[in-house]
Image (spheres, rainbow, N blue to C red):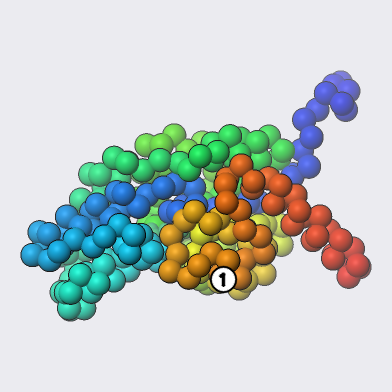
Amino acid sequence: MTPDHDLPDRDLEGWTIAFDLDGTLVETQGDLVGTLNRMLVREGHPPVPMESARKLIGSGARALLEHGFVAAGASWEEASQDALFDAFIADYIEHIADESHPFEGVVETLEQLAERGARLVVATNKRTDLSELLLGKLDLTRHFAAIVGPDKVSAKKPSGAHLKEAVLLAGGEPTMAIMVGDASPDVGAAKDADMPCIVVTFGYTQIPPEELGGDVLIDHFEDLEEAIDGLLTDLYVSRALAGL
Ligand SMILES: O=C(O)COP(=O)(O)O
Ligand SMILES: [Mg+2]
């Protein structure tokens, strides 16, 4: 039998870490806004600048398309046409990983968390097929027990159902889960699911990250483990005090 001190320290065993995708794990703005702008130009509208368009990412492709078109001066009726949405998706599939890449430190941190026994899951408002395609192209699929888009759950973020169901689909337990995200739907879902939420400050959000109401802010992915450790210490103390 292997002596105890030779075993890896699996201190996150039983815990699930749920990750948002766009703006949290992967820098996707170039490709998403690239597709949006190709659609705008094709329809005779001016492209929207990256800085304003990136803030529209977070509620799914249809929301990005509609808000992007309205921001460029189109009517809501034009923006919400099914044919336009289909063309957007077809173009995005073609270009999904042209520029998109994991944020610095993501791969190392995911490996480290898995080594410590954590179960990892993606809970995203990006359609599951697009999420799987992107994560596959970036060789990130292997880290996750499940990839859960809005079409796989009863209600998408900011509903807590998205996170709880994603954790269950990954084989985890919603009362032992932490959310990591970049925008209002992530924090809203975490609060609704009664999960602690870590907010990254490098993602896509209309509301400044420090005003989103998350429990901890991190500026770099490398700071994630420390943030998780801090949250778990607080959680264990408060649950012990509550006699749970
Ligand atoms: O694609 C989007 O708009 C949102 O995706 P996210 O939930 O992973 O941020
Ligand atoms: Mg996001």
Residue in the foreground of this view, choosing between 69 and 81: 69
Where residue 147 appears, x then y in whole percent? 48, 50
Q: In which quarter of the image is the C terminus?
A: bottom right
Q: Is mark 1 on a helix, strand or loop?
A: helix
Which quarter of the figure has residue 237?
A: bottom right
Q: Is residue 177 visible?
A: yes
Q: In the image, is 2 to the left or to the right of 108?
A: right
Question: Residue, x 64% and y 46% (percent of image)?
Answer: 223
Q: In which quarter of the image is the N terminus?
A: top right
Q: As drawn, which residue projects farthest toward the top?
A: 1
Where residue 39 appears, x then y in whole percent? 16, 59
Question: Residue, x 71% and y 47% (percent of image)?
Answer: 226
Residue in the foreground of this view, choosing between 184 and 137: 184
| Badge count | 1
Q: In the image, is 51 to the left or to the right of 124?
A: left
Callout 1 amino acid: Glu
Question: Residue, x 29% and y 71% (percent of image)?
Answer: 67
Q: Is residue 227 above or below residue 97?
A: below
**Neighbours of disc 1 within 10 Å: few (<14), some (14-19), many (20+):** few
Where residue 54 appears, x then y in whole percent? 36, 59
Q: In the image, is 62 to the left or to the right of 166?
A: left
Question: Residue, x 21% and y 78% (percent of image)?
Answer: 76
Q: In the image, is 5 to the left or to the right of 178?
A: right
Query: On the rendering, which quadrant does ligand 1 occupy?
Result: bottom left
Q: Is residue 80 visible?
A: no
Q: Name the residue under label 1.
A: 211
Which quarter of the figure has residue 181?
A: bottom right
Where residue 82 appears, x then y in whole percent? 19, 68
